[in-house]
Image (cartoon, rainbow, N blue to C red):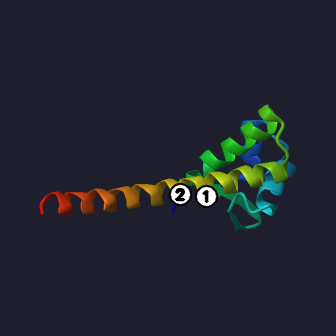
Amino acid sequence: MSERISREELVRIYNIEITFFDDLVEYGLLNIHVEDNIHYLMYEDLPDFEKFANWHYDLEINLPGLEVIHNMLKKLDALKRRNRELMNKLSALNDQYEDI
């Protein structure tokens, strides 16, 4: 099983409000696992959690803003991947035509 951290431990370590964590889950920004009525965040999702906490507490970005920024960054990453794919295809085609 992957490593995980409880919601209560996150709240204590990061000194955040438990409602902030619950709001992130409600907005669909974090996926949690529940076992024996304990909410867990997987370690692989910690970077997203830390990013959201920093944006919210340091930059004072509200939950709807976090959701918009997160979705835009995901779309930007997808566009970057697609652009790399297209550039690789274009480069391969260019190489083929140079050989002719």
Residue at 77%, 66% (x, y): give it: 37
Q: Residue furthest top?
A: 58
Mark 2: amino acid? Leu
Percent x, y of residue 61:
82, 41
Q: Nearer the viewer, residue 88 or 23?
A: 88
8 to 59, vertically: above or below: below
Q: Is residue 44 left or right of residue 20?
A: left
Q: In the structure shown, which secondary structural element does the residue marked by tag 1 occupy? A: helix
Q: Is residue 27 left or right of residue 97?
A: right
Q: Which residue is mark 1?
A: 75
Residue at 78%, 55% (x, y): give it: 24
The numbered dot on residue 95 is none
Q: Are marks 1 and 2 in contact (CB under 8 Å)?
A: yes
Q: Nearer the viewer, residue 1 or 31?
A: 31
Q: Nearer the viewer, residue 42 or 24?
A: 24
Percent x, y of residue 12:
76, 39
Label 1 – label 2 distance at C-alpha? 6 Å
Q: Which residue is mark 2?
A: 79
Residue at 67%, 54% (x, y): give it: 72
Percent x, y of residue 1:
51, 63
Q: Is residue 61 visible?
A: yes
Give the quadrant of the C terminus: bottom left
Mark 2: give few (<14), some (14-19) or many (20+) Cα within 10 Å: few
Residue at 85%, 46% (x, y): give it: 62
Give the total number of marks visible in the rendering. Answer: 2
Q: Is residue 4 visible?
A: no
Mark 1: give few (<14), some (14-19) or many (20+) Cα within 10 Å: few
Percent x, y of residue 74:
61, 56
Q: Is residue 95 left or right of residue 52?
A: left
Mark 1: amino acid? Lys
Q: In the structure shown, which secondary structural element does the residue marked by tag 2 occupy? A: helix
